[in-house]
Amino acid sequence: MSKFIFQLESALKYRRNIEEQETIHLVRAKQKVQVEEGMANILHLEKREHFNSYDLNKMNLTVMQQQEAYLSLLDLRIKKQLDKLDQANKNFGVQRSRLVEASTKRKSLETLKEKSFDEYRSVLSKAEQNMLDDIGTTAYCHKQ
């Protein structure tokens, strides 16, 4: 009997490639989230350090106004950074769902391939059994 050939092998390879690409996109999205988290943490740390170095006894009104303006600007930068982080997290969620979808499609083709291979083995086993039955019948007829 001929060698097993899965008719949808090219489609399966295509699905594997798509899954690999989606995995790469997911990794990049995760890296983006980590970068944005790092930037947000740096800004929060900068604000905390600024508050820790804040000494009311050594400041005059002008310096206090400058400090307040700086803190307002820093709060605005933190808000923008948190918005970027939120967007990166949303993108990560989208990429994760796309990877799950690609994996599901690939697995369905692999399941189909396994079923097809099991059917091929079954047909091969039946053909082998028929051949052995024929040999046994022929040997029995020649013996008598």
Image (spheres, rainbow, N blue to C red):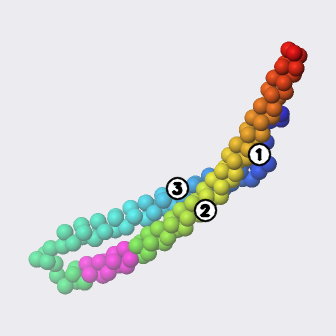
Report if residue 75 lies within the magenta region: yes
- Identify the element where label 1 is drawn: loop
Q: Residue 134 appears in which quarter of the rendering?
A: top right
Q: Position of residue 144 (x, y in %)?
A: 87, 15
Relative to 99, 37 lies left or right: left
Give the labeled residue for mark 1. 6
Q: Which residues are magenta?
A: 66-79
- Mark 3 or mark 2, whichever is nearer to me: 2
- Identify the element where label 3 is drawn: helix
Q: Position of residue 75 (x, y in %)?
A: 33, 77
Q: CA distance from mark 3 to mark 2?
A: 16 Å
Q: Label 2 is placed on what type of residue?
A: Glu
User: Looking at the image, is mark 3 or mark 2 earlier in the sequence?
Assistant: 3
Q: Residue 48 appears in which quarter of the rendering?
A: bottom left
Q: Image point 29% across, 78% down: which residue?
A: 71
- Mark 3 or mark 1, whichever is nearer to me: 1
Q: Position of residue 128 (x, y in %)?
A: 78, 31
State yes or no: discs 3 and 2 in contact (Cβ < 8 Å): no
Q: Residue furthest left?
A: 57
Give the labeled residue for mark 3. 27
Q: CA distance from mark 1 to mark 2?
A: 23 Å
Mark 1 Cα shell of 10 Å, populated few (<14), some (14-19), many (≥20)? some
Q: Label 3 is placed on what type of residue?
A: Val
Q: Is residue 77 visible?
A: no
Q: Label 1 is placed on what type of residue?
A: Phe
Relative to 9, 104 lies left or right: left
Report if residue 82 lies within the magenta region: no
Q: Is residue 79 above or below residue 24?
A: below
- 73 vs 94, nearest the viewer: 94
Give the labeled residue for mark 2. 101
Q: Is residue 115 above or below residue 89?
A: above
